Image (spheres, rainbow, N blue to C red):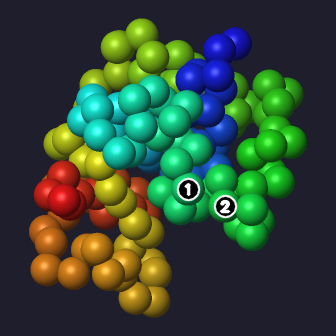
Amino acid sequence: MDNDTDSIARTIFGEARGEGKHGMQAIANTIMNRVAKKSWYGLTPYEVCHKPWQYSCWNAADPNCQIINDVDNTVPVFCDALQIAGNAISGGLDDITGGATHYYNKHMAQPPEWAEGKTPCASIGSHLFFNNIG
């Protein structure tokens, strides 16, 4: 498996493994939307996923970091993540987020500063998605 597919799968597993396939697809959409921007986010899915402080599951202090580094294809939800990642890489993943590049869990005590005054473009599972973040 290539680094891009692996990175997407681990990211969506770390960020949305409890959200079902629909929720994991939405996270994959944000990754691919950032790749499409060809900006400071990164030029490849690997670069986008591993950009510091962007997808919290990759932050060393985040409890998900060890989980995503240890998971393998004996875990059924990770197999779902691998399938979604493969579809994203092949261009066969519909964007269900309306072009979102950002999201946060709507159950957070306080929304992130970057979301202040912004209107979400989608609400999928526990996440609010945004396509209007500069």
Give the mark toward the camera: 1 or 2: 1
| Residue on which the image places disc 1 | 52
Type of the residue with mark 2: Asn
The answer, for residue 128, to whether it is visible in the render is yes
Where residue 112 sits in the image (x, y, percent)? 37, 78
Where residue 24 sits in the image (x, y, percent)? 49, 41
**Looking at this view, is 64 or 125 the one in front?**
64
Packing grade of label 2 (10 A; few <14, some 14-19, many >=20) is some
Residue drawn at x 70%, y 13% is 1
Left or right of 52 on screen, residue 42: left
| Residue on which the image places disc 2 | 59
> Do the CB atoms of the residues marked 1 and 2 lie less than 8 Å apart?
yes
Left or right of 110 on screen, residue 9: right
The answer, for residue 31, to whether it is visible in the render is no
Left or right of 13 on screen, residue 99: left
Type of the residue with mark 1: Pro
